[in-house]
Image (spheres, rainbow, N blue to C red):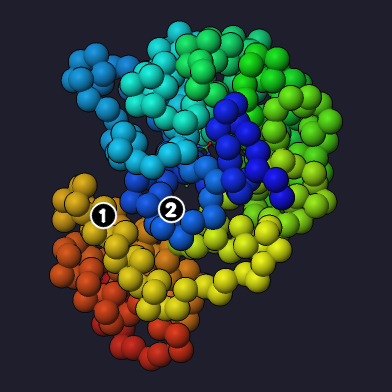
Amino acid sequence: MPPIYIGQVKVDPPILQAPMAGYTNYAYRQMVREFGGAGLQATEMVNASGFAWLHEHEAEHPDRLWGVKEEARPLAVQMWDNDPATLAKVGERLANELHVSVVDINFGCPVKDVTEKAHSGSYLLKFPDRIAQIVERVVKACAPTPVTAKIRLGCSRDAINAIEIAKVVESAGAAALTVHGRTAADFFRGTADWNRIAEIKPHLKKIPLIGNGDLDSPEKVIEAFRRYGVDGVMIARASMGRPWLFRQAAAALRGEPVPPDPTAEEQRLTMLRHYELTCARFGEQKGTLLMRKFACNYATGRPGARTFRAMVANVFTREDFFNVVERYFPREEPHDVDIPPHVYK
Ligand SMILES: Cc1cc2nc3c(=O)[nH]c(=O)nc-3n(C[C@H](O)[C@H](O)[C@H](O)COP(=O)(O)O)c2cc1C
């Protein structure tokens, strides 16, 4: 599968790591980077108004930009808002001060705080003219750094307008479009509609189409390219506790044997490195709390995961964390462990 170009940025392989608020921070991105296979990685979405305020009042960057300055490229930063001027101002800083590779704009978030309260994210799918204005302003402000958009199919099943939005986004100067094959009203229910994603392809004349939704194996990645004709794919949830999934999908795309999952011991060490990076940034107390959900993700689907999840949900200190990992993190073979009664309190 040939690489794709987002403006001048080569995305090779054309497998992208999705932005996920609360998850795709610097520590997670490092784990993905160590395994390899993601042609472009993305931060969590950043609120442009909040960014602008922090910059003016505190001369600081939001926590969600942790690591961005020093991190390897290519790297996309995603932002959301509904005001073209604010988005342009923040985009310009991301491009020219932080030198990110790609500035991505969120038009897909279905969360009420973003849609109903802030009239942003997927709310804007109802307003193609506004999307056009936003993309145009941001493209101009960020040039020559490429600007991309991430959308859903529409606001709801009876208001699917992804083709119209795709054309608007392309005409406004965006360098790529990512489509999550659900509507905002779907949230994460049902399955992503890849036929609808495929229908968009003939309407994009110049820019790559990146398909997203429910890709959780190398086989599904191959199928997305072969059957639905997308130029690139984006993986989100399935990679939460499996940062090696990109490497496996990339091998499959090259027609090579898919590397096996890391051993349980390697997975444990990956999680512990993830923990150390997180605590180095947030301190032991906050870092440990933050790592609970990541630790659960690493255990998902493995024998003993339930017990591990129950135990790790109660850790507060580094010592607790390491003890629980040592005792309960799933091993290769199912193993019986005693569950202290307080866990189910
Ligand atoms: C916890 C969580 C946070 C997310 N945050 C973002 C975000 O910040 N920006 C965005 O564009 N999409 C976000 N998404 C959507 C994903 O990027 C992706 O479009 C969606 O999960 C479908 O892909 P998947 O089936 O591979 O998970 C988020 C999804 C999840 C589960």
Secondary element at image label 1: helix
Q: Residue at x 65, y 71 (%)?
A: 257
Is residue 235 among the parts visible in the rendering?
yes
Secondary element at image label 2: helix
Within 10 Å of disc 1 (Cα), the crowding (few <14, some 14-19, many 20+) is: some
Is residue 310 among the parts visible in the rendering?
no
Q: Residue at x 75, y 50 (%)?
A: 225
Mark 2 residue CB less than 8 A from any atom of ligand 1: no
Q: Residue at x 47, y 31 (%)?
A: 101
Closer to the observer: label 1 or label 2? 2
Give the x, y percent position of residue 252: 67, 63
Give the x, y percent position of residue 53: 28, 17
* Amino acid type, mark 1: Leu
Q: Quadrant of residue 326?
A: bottom left
Would you name the residue on which mark 1 appears? 277
Would you name the residue on which mark 2 appears? 33
Mark 1 residue CB less than 8 A from any atom of ligand 1: no
* Quarter of the image that includes the C terminus: bottom left
